[in-house]
Amino acid sequence: MEFKTGTATAKILALVALVAFGYCAAAGPNPILLRASIAGQEENRSTKRVLWTDSPLVFSEEVAKSPRYRSRHWQRSVYPLGNGRLGCTVFGDPRRERIQFNEDCTGGYQPFGGVYVEMPHSEYSDYRRELDISRAVQTITYASDGVRYRREYFASHPAQVMVFRFLADKAGALGGKLPGPKVGKWGQFQEWMEDIDDPQDTHRHINHMVVVHPGRQIHPTITPKLAEGAKVSLVARRDGGPGWSQAWPSGSAKGFRVRGGYELDLECKSGQLAKAAMRGISNKPGKVQVRPGEHTCTFALAKGESRVLRPSDFSSRQ
């Protein structure tokens, strides 16, 4: 996803993080602002109170290699924002913004996810990152190639949203993109934006697999490289983890609900499909395509009907 300004004021509401998941109602993170790293304090006649620093939160190569050092550096450097249910910390890098956010259904201070915005700024100067405690607004300003840039961040309790606004003082100067999923150096579907996955680590998260299932952004026929990367990641996790990463060489399972309103039973022998039964539960009239591996089988299946499939039905692409 890319964005670019074209108005006279060059203002853009770049991101409105509507991470307002209505199913969680418990009280969430309550940021303790005084624990933020205080590079400076200032107070003017209007009793404005500000925490500020002249540098973004960027991990050095040495710090990035150690989770413990990363955590300590983060705790000393961030200015948290929150509205009681949603919370975030802003890293403030002009070249690559990172906004780490959480939501109270994660159990307090555990991170829920992150938003990255890549900007075409190789060099910058006159940098300032500040948190106005009186207004609960974080602001980042800097200059690059003769243009002044400004970013504003706040969390609204009445609206239950977090808002991030990116601005520039020159029309057309503000451009950037949201990076998408990537395949890492050993062929894996990256869990993190940085390629830091360890192929020897069997205690592996699979939260990023949500784009494979139940999401559908990654699919073998639409995004084959990313789909293969997802397969590599699951294989690397092996069968020691819980949930859908586990597999069985022989056995059967019944009652899988399938997209489109179908139900599926499976029987496997020696790691291969031996038989499958597909039933129409709430599906619309039309054809259904089943793809257990490299081959597919396409057939019509009306609501209330069933079809038994065997390996010979998938002997060639259809």
Image: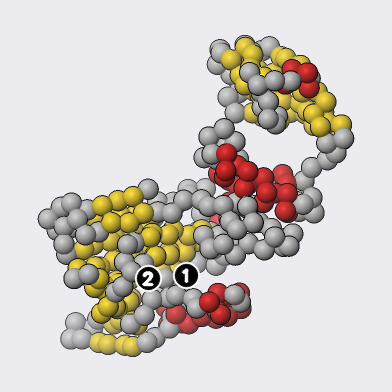
Q: Earlier in the sequence, mark 2 or mark 1?
A: 1
- Image position of 273 (left or right of 286): right
Query: Amino acid type of disc 2?
Result: Gly
84 or 277, which lies in front?
A: 277
Specify the amino acid type for callout 1. Answer: Asn
Count of numbered circles in the view: 2
In the displayed structure, 86 sits above or below 40; it is above
Q: Is residue 10 visible in the rendered structure shown here? A: yes
- The residue closer to the viewer here, 146 or 209, is 146
Locate residue 38: give its quadrant. Answer: bottom left
Snapshot quadrant of residue 174: bottom left
The picture quadrant where one finds residue 57 is bottom left
- What colouring method underlies this structural image? secondary structure
State the residue at coordinates (56%, 12%): 285
Q: Position of residue 50 (x, y in %)?
A: 30, 81
Which dot marks residue 258? none
**Residue 287: horizontal and vertical position, in percent?**
58, 15
Task: Answer left or right for 275 relative to 217.
Answer: right
x and y percentages locating residue 6 in the rendered image:
18, 51
Q: Give the structural element (helix, strand or loop) at label 1.
A: loop
Drawn side of residue 11 relative to residue 22, left or right:
left
| Residue of label 1 | 30
| Residues tagged 2 and 1 counted as in contact (Cβ below 8 A) | no
| Numbered badge on residue 92 | 2
Q: Position of residue 75 (x, y in %)?
A: 50, 79
